[in-house]
C-alpha cells in the first residue's frame, strides 16, 4: 500500500472522463489498497482513481460505520424522482463544501474487484456518494452541479485557502 498524491482543483484531469477497467488482476487490487490509504489520509469518505491521476472507472467508499466498498465500472441504472440536498466536497478541494441536489436513491450496476457483475440499490449517504463519484468518473466535478455564482464564490474561497496554506 502507498499513499498517492491527490490532484488539486482545477487540474484538467479531474474533468476528463475515465476509461473502463478491463484487467481484474493484481494491479487493480494494489490500486484499491493505494486508494483506500490515500482516502483515509486525506481524510475523506470517497475517492476515485482519477483523483490520483489514474484515468480508470474505479471508486472506493469508506463511509462511517460501514465496510469499505469498491466499485469498478459503476453506472447508474435508475434513480428516484425524489431529490434531496446534502453537503458535498472533494478530496481534490479540501476545506470547501456546499449543498448539492441529488436523487434520493439510485440503483447502480458495477463490477467487484474480481470482475463479477453486481447491482446495488443505495439511499441516503451511500446514494449521494455514488452519484458524486460516478459524476467524477464522467468528468463532472461536483462544483458543476452548483450555480455559477456559488461556483465562483467557492473557487475564490479555495484559492485563498491554497494561498494561505503556502
Image (spheres, helix red, strand yellow):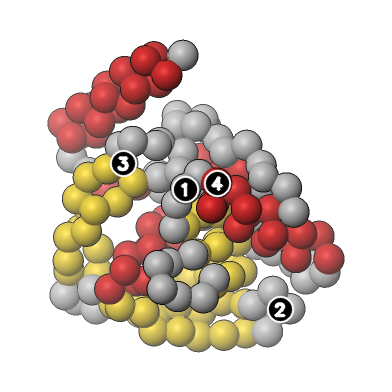
Contact? badges 4 and 2 (CB < 8 Å):
no
Q: In this rendering, does residue 14 appear at all?
A: yes
Q: Earlier in the sequence, mark 4 or mark 2?
A: 4
**Residue nearest the observer in this picture, 115 or 93:** 93
Please state the horizontal and vertical placement of residue 123, each as a whole percent of the image: 30, 78
Q: Residue at x 26, y 24 (%)?
A: 157
Query: For mark 4, what is the residue?
Result: 41
Secondary structure of residue under mark 1: loop
Q: Tell me, for residue 18, which label it has, or none.
A: none
**Residue 65 or residue 108, whichever sits in front:** 65
Where is 162 relative to 91, above or below? Answer: above
Residue 144 appears in the figure: no
Q: Is residue 109 above or below residue 26?
A: below
Q: Of helix, strand and loop, which one carries label 3?
A: helix
Q: How much space separates mark 4 and mark 2, taking CA atoms?
A: 27 Å
Whether tag 4 and tag 3 are in contact, CB under 8 A, the answer is no
The answer to which of 69 and 2 lies nearer the viewer is 2
Labels 1 and 3 touching (C-beta < 8 A)? no
Mark 4 crowd level (few <14, some 14–19, many ≥20, 10 Å Cα): few
Give the labeled residue for mark 3.
Answer: 143
- Looking at the image, is mark 1 or mark 3 earlier in the sequence? 1
| Quadrant of the rendered image containing residue 59 | bottom right
Residue 14 horizontal/vertical position (percent): 51, 40
> Residue 115: which numbered mark, if any?
2
| Residue 3 found in image quarter | top right
Q: Residues within 10 Å of mark 2 (few under 14, many from 20)?
A: some
Q: Are marks 1 and 4 in contact (CB under 8 Å)?
A: yes
In primary-sequence order, the first of circles 4 and 3 is 4
Q: Which residue is mark 1?
A: 43
Q: Is residue 121 left or right of residue 71?
A: left
Residue beneath the point at 23% across and 73% down: 104
Frontmost of labels 4 and 3 is: 4
Amino acid at each position: 500500500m502507498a499513499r498517492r498524491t491527490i490532484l488539486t482543483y482545477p487540474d484538467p484531469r479531474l474533468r476528463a472522463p475515465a476509461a473502463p477497467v478491463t484487467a481484474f488482476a493484481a494491479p487493480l487490487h494494489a490500486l484499491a489498497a493505494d486508494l483506500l490509504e490515500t482516502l483515509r489520509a486525506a481524510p475523506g469518505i470517497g475517492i476515485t482513481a482519477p483523483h490520483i491521476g489514474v484515468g480508470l472507472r474505479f471508486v472506493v467508499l469508506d463511509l462511517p460505520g460501514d465496510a469499505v466498498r469498491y466499485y469498478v465500472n459503476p453506472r447508474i441504472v435508475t434513480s428516484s424522482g425524489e431529490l434531496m440536498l446534502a453537503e458535498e466536497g472533494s478530496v481534490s478541494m479540501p476545506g470547501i463544501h456546499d449543498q448539492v441536489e441529488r436523487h434520493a436513491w439510485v440503483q447502480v450496476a458495477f463490477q467487484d474487484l474480481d470482475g463479477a457483475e453486481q447491482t446495488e440499490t443505495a439511499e441516503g449517504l451511500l446514494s449521494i456518494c455514488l452519484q458524486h463519484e460516478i459524476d467524477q468518473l464522467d468528468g463532472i466535478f461536483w462544483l458543476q452541479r452548483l450555480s455559477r455564482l456559488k461556483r465562483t464564490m467557492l473557487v475564490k474561497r479555495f484559492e485563498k485557502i491554497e494561498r494561505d496554506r503556502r
